[in-house]
Amino acid sequence: MTGLLMRGADKPKSVRRFTWDVTIYLILAAVLLVGFAINPEFGTAFNFSAILANMGEIMLIAMPMTLLIISGEIDLSVASIVGLSGVVFGYTYYFGGVPIAVAAALGILTGALCGALNGFLVAKLALGSLAVTIATLALFRGFATAILGNESVAEYPEAWTNFGYDTIGTSFIPRTFPLIVTFILLFAVLAHLTSFGRRVYGIGQNVEAARFAAISVTTYKWILFILTGTMSGVAGIVYTLRFSTAQWDNAIGLELAVISVVLLGGVSIFGGIGSIWGVVGAALLFGTLEALFNLQGISPNVFTVVTGVLLISAVVIPVALRRLNQAREFREGAKTRIPVDSSTGSRPKEPSGGS
Amino acid sequence: MSGPTVPAPTTTTAGRARKLINGRIASLFLILALAIGITAAVNPRFLGGSGLTDLLIGSAVIGILAVGLTPVVIARHIDLSIASTTGLSAYVTLSIVVPNGWGLWQSFAIGAGIGLLVGTVNGLLVAGLNIPSLVVTLGTLSIVRGILYFYSDAGRFTPDVIPPSLIAMGLDTILDIPIIFWITLGFALFAAWWMRYTPVGRDLYAIGSNPPAAQLVGINIFQRTLLAFMWSGLMAGIAGVLYIGQFAFVDASAFINQELAVVTAVVVGGVNIFGGSGTIIGALLGALLIRVIAGGLVAVGVDPFWQQAVNGVLLITAIGLDRILALRSQAKIQRIREDRVEEQSWRE
């Protein structure tokens, strides 16, 4: 695991990133310990089964989102894609009369097409991913509403819904778990062990330099958007089966949870920095906290507040740490040599400069 | 673009830029008139009776939020927390006003205070710590809504307990224009003056056009950005009070998920989502336009379920149009600059 992590860009940064990843897992361990200590129901197989199942969709979407944010873009339309692909899946199966496997494939294809549209608008037409995906957030959700209206499709073959919420044999592991682990491993390899992944980091660190290095930034961003759309499509099918309901407002607001998890996992909102392992740890932390809140009988509304606080602090903490580090380096530098860069510390810009 | 720091010779550039913006407003009026005209032609009931009044009542809340959001977007930021703030302001205001038997003015004071508070927190996080406004306001979106859910404890306010003065505000008209729309219009005119003729407004345009350049010419970016977010929070607070008047029913889900409708109104109204250009009046027209289209679709018999998809298409079209216009005006400015350099070298 550390081997993968240490394949970072320059040394000091990868060391700092290493500590951030470990910190996430340490906090996770602490939350687990507290859970075991204060609530007897926390340590049950049922609870862990629920945590793993609840984090499924978030995990599936967070994987490509990690790469997308590392490349310096963002996709706010993912939750709408989850809703739309679920609706397409349910509609074509129930009203269209196609075999359920085909319906699922159509749902995932819908996700891929949504991602392709985002990619076209952002990468090809250079329209700023934030604005575009706010627009497609409304557009895709609108399609879902237009297709199903207020109806919902809730009848699926038992074998399929069992996949959504049953566990493997008598164990506590959800049946969706192997699928999710497979995707995590695939994305970890893609991000950390392939030239594709390295180039994505390169684009995020310095897009101009990436262009000079003959990386086709447009193609890469387009691929990343299609990946994000496709995985949101997969998540849409999983979500529909897990609740055995396809309706227009499935997973509304899920984008917030996904982005919180990615940023909490140490991915820089400015691009260029982050790791799959950090994000996996953050997702587990998020799910465990949510379960603990539930068990303690704390209202889910409090968890909404916690999500927001986590999202903001996930960005504030790295910025604050960087400022502290810069101030310290500046002070130490002042003792031994003449300070050269007087602007340091006054305005920490994006880390792409490689301080 | 045409900030006070621009030296005299560029007045022609500024003039051309202004012409371009005015063209945008004129075309917005045209589209608005066209949309109303077509809908009224297909379905005369659209404008008949209280149709126009309803239209203005329906656009008052989104309109005032658009007026609030515009300076933030012009400064190259975004505020997604406004819809949550509107809901919080509406609920908390009633929860204080109703037991005390207070009326209109106290409501506005409380609503404004709540809005200013949220706006200040947003502004301090964005401007003070240099965190992207998208992240901050996505966070405060859920924090504010969560606090509202927690505070309301599944409670709600029905018309029988809401102060009559607030309900009257949502029903009465002066000169055939609803009172709540007059309020929106008043704030819009103030903001239009503020953005156009005061240093704060001009600085916000400068910050949005080119942040590093704005820093170099000595603009206090921290203070100006903070002010923009405080303004947007203040308008969201006032919008909460208008919301009470419009709907006369408030619970914890008041105005939930409406932030994107406001962003759509602002961008459709010609405010560049990448900052630096746009006008308050344009944003207000944008709010009216999406309201007309929403009502128009229903009036001509389109399934209301298509509404959101239409909003998405509108937004993408507006962003694309902005991009094309920006590229064109950039090319124009470039050409003018080259001409001037030639002229100068000829004089020398």
Image (cartoon, coloured by chain):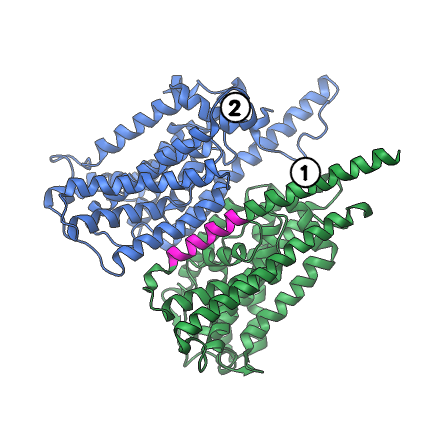
Chain colours: A blue, B green
The residue stretch that appears in magenta? B308-321
Chain for numbered disc 1: B
Residue A210, disc: 2
Dividing the picture into quarters, in which one does residue B231 lie? bottom right
Pick the front one: A310 or B253: B253
Q: Residues within 10 Å of mark 2 (few under 14, many from 20)?
A: some
| Residue A5: x %, y % from top left | 42, 21
Q: Residue at x 31, y 37 (%)?
A: A230
Q: Residues within 10 Å of mark 1 (few under 14, many from 20)?
A: few
Of tags 2 and 1, which is closer to the observer?
A: 2
Q: Quadrant of the C terminus of chain A?
A: top right
Pick the front one: B160 or A114: A114
Under mark 1, the amino acid is: Pro
Q: Is residue A261 above or below residue B43?
A: above
Q: Residue at x 14, y 45 (%)?
A: A98
| Residue B278: x %, y % from top left | 61, 54
Residue A44 appearing in the image: no
SS majority, magenta: helix
**SS class of the residue under badge 2?**
helix
Residue to which mark 1 is pinned: B212
Q: Is residue B304 above or below residue B41?
A: above
Q: Quadrant of the N terminus of chain A?
A: top left
